[in-house]
Image (cartoon, grey):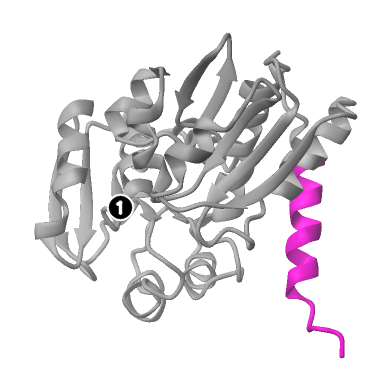
Amino acid sequence: MTGGNKAAVLGSPIAHSLSPALHRAAYAALGLDGWTYTWIECDEAGLPGLIASCDRGWAGLSLTMPLKRAVLPLLDRTEPIATKVGGANTVVFADGARHGYNTDVPGMVAALAEAGVTSPAGATILGAGATACAALAALRDIGLTSVVVQVRDQARAGDLLAVADRLGMAVELRPFGSAVPSGDLLLSTVPAGAADFFYAERGVVSRPAPAAVLDVVYHPWPTPLAIAAAQSGAIVVSGFDLLLHQAARQVELMTGLQPAPLEAMRAAGQAELARRSQPAHR
C-alpha cells in the first residue's frame, strides 16, 4: 500500500467529475475509513506546483486532459504503455517517487470484454485526441494490428500517428463521416454531440451496422449515437463503463489492494448519474 491516504482528481473544469463518487465508494467497501478523495481545479500551469506540494500524506492523483500529457516530464517513473500513448492519467506516490500509469487502456479493454467484445473483425475510431491514442493501445491488446481513424482535419492527427508508430499499429486516416465497415467495432472518442449527425442520423442506423459501439460520453446518456446503435442491433458500451473500469484500476494502484470493489463502485456511479439527471428542485 502507498504511504498516504489522500487522493484527488485534477483538471479544469473538474467539478463535474464522477471520479469522487467512484473512489469514495471503493474506499468504503474496502474499509479504508481514513482515506479521502476529492477534486481539485488545476490547469497545466498549476500542475508542477501542485504535484510538488503533495507530501507523504498523498497516495495518488487522477488526471484529466490536458494534464495527462503535461504530467509526463514531472514523473520519476512511467510505465511503458503510458509513455507509448503519450499520456498518464494516474500518479501514484510511493517510495518517495512519482509513478505514472495509464489506466484508460486496460479500462477500455475491460469495459469491452465485459460486454463480450474481445476479438472484433476490425475497428474504426472517431477522433484523434488523447482518448483515441489510448483506444489504439486497447485495440492492439485485443489483437488488432490496423485501425481506421476518422478525423475532421488530418493535419491534426500527428500525435495519434506517432502513437500508432510506437505501438506498431497501422492507421488509415479517413474523413469524418465516412461509412463504417459492417462488423467493425466503432469507438467514438469525440465530445457529446459531435458524432450525432453522421452516425446517429445517417450511419449506424443503416444496414449493415457496426457489431459494437463504444461511446466515451457518459452524461447525458444514452447519446443519440448509443440509441441508434442499439436500434441497429449493435452491442453498446458506454463512457461510464470505461470510466468505471479505469477507476477500478486506479483504486488498485493507489491502495495496493486487489481486486477493486467493482460492483460497489458501479452502484455509486449510477446513483450519482441518476441524481444529476433529476430536474433541479425549486
| The N terminus, quarter of image | top right
Q: Quadrant of residue 140?
A: top left
**Residue drawn at (38%, 69%) of the image:** 204
Q: Residues within 10 Å of mark 1 (few under 14, many from 20)?
A: some
| The C terminus, quarter of image | bottom right
**Residue drawn at (78%, 66%) of the image:** 274
Residue 122 spot, x, y in % from top left: 29, 43
As drawn, 52 above or below 215: above
Magenta region = 264-282
- Per the image, the residue denoted by label 1 is 129
Q: Is residue 226 visible?
A: yes
Q: Inspect the magenta stretch and tell me whether residue 109 lies in it.
A: no
Q: Is residue 116 visible?
A: no
- Most common SS among magenta residues: helix
As drawn, 39 above or below 74: below
As drawn, 20 above or below 114: below
Total labels: the figure holds 1
- Front residue of this view, candidates 12 and 272: 12
As drawn, 16 above or below 120: below
User: For this view, does 7 lie left or right of residue 91?
Assistant: right
User: For this view, does 113 lie left or right of residue 184?
Assistant: right
Q: Secondary structure at mark 1?
A: loop
